[in-house]
Image (spheres, rainbow, N blue to C red):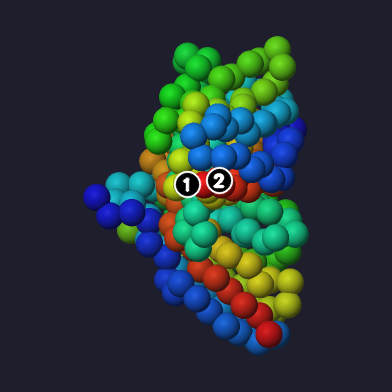
Amino acid sequence: AQSVTQLDSHVSVSEGTPVLLRCNYSSSYSPSLFWYVQHPNKGLQLLLKYTSAATLVKGINGFEAEFKKSETSFHLTKPSAHMSDAAEYFCVVTPDRGSTLGRLYFGRGTQLTVWP
Amino acid sequence: KAGVTQTPRYLIKTRGQQVTLSCSPISGHRSVSWYQQTPGQGLQFLFEYFSETQRNKGNFPGRFSGRQFSNSRSEMNVSTLELGDSALYLCASSGGTRNGEQFFGPGTRLTVL
């Protein structure tokens, strides 16, 4: 079975400080992992994806994530937060085989607040 | 390249009515998936269509149905609407590779009164 746990429902940081959004996953098969961001009243935008290549994945807007198989984690980081980063972030897993191939499993989301 | 478009963007219906939502994928994409987003349940998978065939289905009642046309455009239908069907319905398209990224539309906000 596939599932995602986002360890924090809310994260608040000051502008210019680092961001860490935590995600643990469970997958019956080798997973592909994604981080999506959703700004208010907008659809979901892909930040980055891991598909069994390099374990450190760089995405858009300065975000990156590291796949750690031993810890079943895929945490999202950014060295310096910007006001425009305030949004909801979703960690997503999809298996690379099996009956649910192609289906995305979403975490419950982490709301990121950035203070000036 | 145009993104995923969804119509209408907002919809208000009353209990018992039915509704049809439309999604036009990115040109060349053959896979369309539908998701329901609510504050209580988060993002949940409804179904996926590929080349006019339903390839995957989530755990929703039969009141939720969909179809895909030969031009890859997709519709989803909800019959006998319930208050709990109020949600943001998101459509996503992809090239069809089974672990490829999905591109999301802006969603249709459905309110059931």
Q: Amino acid at mark 1?
A: Met
Residue A25 at x, y percent in the picture = 70, 29
Residue shown at the point (58%, 56%) measured from the top left? B35
Q: Disc 2 sits on a residue from what chain?
A: A
Q: Quadrant of residue B101?
A: top left
Residue occupying the far left of the picture = B1
Where residue B70 appears, x then y in whole percent?
A: 36, 58
Q: CA distance from mark 2 to mark 1?
A: 6 Å
Residue B91 visible at all: no
The residue nearer to you, when weighing A10 against A12, is A12
To which residue does mark 2 refer? A114
Residues at marks 2 and 1 touching, judged by CB atoms closer than 8 Å: yes
How many discs mark residues in the rendered view?
2
Name the outermost residue toward the front. A116
Amino acid type, mark 2: Val
Q: Nearer the viewer, residue A70 or B23?
A: A70
Is disc 2 placed on a helix, strand or loop? Answer: strand
Residue underneath mark 1: A83
The image position of residue A102, as x and y in percent, is 55, 38
Q: Name the side, left or right, on which A48 lies relative to B16.
A: left
* Chain letter of the residue carrying label 1: A
